[in-house]
Image (tube, rainbow, N blue to C red):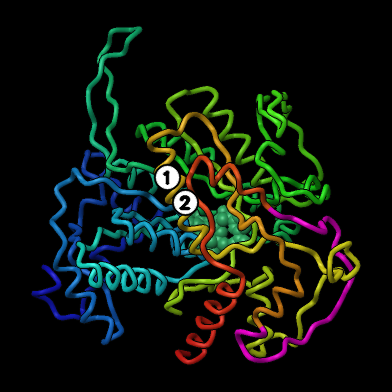
Amino acid sequence: MSSTSSSRFDLGDHVQDQDLSEEYLTSSSRDYSAGSSPLTTPALSDNEFEFDVPSEDALLEQSSTTQAPADGSEKYIMVIGGLGYIGSHTTLELLREGHNVIVVDNLSNSYKTVLKNVRMLAAHHCKVNNVPMPRLRFFRIDYRSKAMHVLLERYSKPVMTVDATSGRQVVSYQSQIAGVIHFAAYKSVVESIQQPLRYYRNNVCGLVNLLQELERFNIRNFIFSSSATVYGSKANAGLPLKEEDLVHHQVKTQNEAGETTIVEPTIEGLSCPYARTKYFGEAILADVAEADADWRIVALRYFNPVGCDPSGVLGESPRGEPTNLFPVLTQVLKGDRPELSVFGSDWPTRDGTAIRDFIHVLDVARGHIAALNWNTKKGNGFSTFNLGSGTGTTVLEAVRSLEQAAGREIPLALVDRRPGDVGSCVASTDRAAKELGWTTRESITKCAADLWNYVSKVSLRS
Ligand SMILES: NC(=O)c1ccc[n+]([C@@H]2O[C@H](COP(=O)([O-])OP(=O)(O)OC[C@H]3O[C@@H](n4cnc5c(N)ncnc54)[C@H](O)[C@@H]3O)[C@@H](O)[C@H]2O)c1
């Protein structure tokens, strides 16, 4: 059934989006053990979409008809946590760049409407540029569940190889998944202090199991969402943070005078369980890459992603209470909060408020594509890159940029510093520019304008 032969509005979830809950697996276990994955029924069709917005629907239908039928040889990028804030923007950029994408998300901090919006924007891009719409598949699963194994198996082909030492025939896999971008994690600092085990289970145990599964299916091209938080109190030095400020194994590097120096792995002042989950994640990945030279792993250390797609259709819409500066600011603007608490107004900065490195989320998304391309062609072991703008903006300057975009004042309360906060945290962007050929394109003004555009449109829609 293709979209051209079916009613526009009756394309059900089962067509492309499969809820692979544990329950589903159990009920299908007979088929699975007999060798046919439960994922094989119902059959997926790449030419069917689910829409509910009439004006967008016509656009999507036209674009979807340009797709070639799947024959099992096409390659995909798997995006885990691909409906979240950064994941959805990255999925969109991947589609715009022509990659087929498999999104895995359990919707613990996102909504399925995000999928429709990503599809719609990607289809619009393809139509305007007269290029075929890549495939986009969505699986609503917890990446830690057994369903993940089933999913990976479904996109893999078993091949017989001869083990070099024993001479025996063994089954190995060739996967259609050319690379994995792993966003799925819990991310609230405050919640991580209250529920550390929940954070370690998702962000650390989940990662370990995932890596084992990927190894089993010979998928060793991996991009990991890390954070500037791994630098801990090293940010207090007040200098732009360089990747070699945190290494996991001893490395030789050259200083500005061209002299070789040896950097030892040391950590300082990781202030909360969330920060430690990111640090442990990186350390595990570095060890995995050290042990097996076939792995190519990049950890991207994001500074402060803000803004959203300029269409105003895609943004940041978490299920829980937001804690990052810009989502909180928008709550104040919408009247959902009375004021913004500014933590610390006595930092040694130009206006006394803390300095952060804000980066447009689309620049972050493009950074993933640059990293993926680099890793696929030149990746070697474990590598780290900062994704920041390299420009420091004070909290008050960020507030002013949003006030300007919204055309109204934001009420502020200047309160004490929070324990563990640093006065300044700005990225050195040299490594990403030199190796990945990636630099930011957007300014803080653009971040604020795009965010306000999204917020105003959401208010109009709701
Ligand atoms: N947003 C930031 O400011 C920031 C900064 C630095 C690092 N990061 C990291 O980047 C990544 C993405 O951040 P974000 O802001 O997009 O977060 P987000 O919460 O918006 O997105 C995460 C997505 O992963 C999904 N998810 C979580 N656990 C899952 C699981 N077990 N199985 C399947 N899906 C699961 C959620 O439903 C959500 O859609 C996270 O790893 C976060 O720690 C974010």
Around disc 2, counting alpha carbons within 10 Å, would you say few (fewer than 14), some (14 to 19), or many (20 or more)?
A: many
Q: Which residue is mark 1?
A: 372
Q: Position of residue 364 (x, y in %)?
A: 52, 58
Q: Residue furthest front?
A: 257
Depth check: 226 or 138 in front? Answer: 226
Quarter of the figure with the N terminus:
bottom left
- Residue 345 horizontal side relative to residue 127, left or right: right
**Range covered by the magenta-colored residues:** 403-426
Q: Amino acid at mark 2?
A: His
Q: Is residue 105 above or below residue 126?
A: above
Residue at 30% x, 41% y is 153
Ligand 1 located in image quadrant: bottom right
Residue 30 in sight from this viewpoint: no
Dot 1 beta carbon under 8 Å from ligand 1: no
Residue 378 in sight from this viewpoint: yes
Q: Secondary structure at mark 1?
A: helix
Q: Position of residue 236 (x, y in %)?
A: 83, 50
Residue at 86% x, 59% y is 419
Query: In the drawing, what numbered circle is on residue 103?
Result: none
**Circle count:** 2
Q: Position of residue 246 (x, y in %)?
A: 70, 38
The answer to whether mark 1 and mark 2 are in CB contact below 8 A is yes
- Residue 213 horizontal side relative to residue 30, left or right: right
- Residue 73 horizontal side relative to residue 260, left or right: left
Query: In the drawing, what numbered circle is on residue 368?
Result: 2
> Is 408 a magenta residue?
yes
Q: Position of residue 8 (x, y in %)?
A: 18, 80
Q: Is residue 461 above or below residue 284?
A: below
> Is 168 a magenta residue?
no
Q: Secondary structure at mark 2?
A: helix
Q: CA distance from mark 1 to mark 2?
A: 6 Å
Residue at 23% x, 71% y is 127
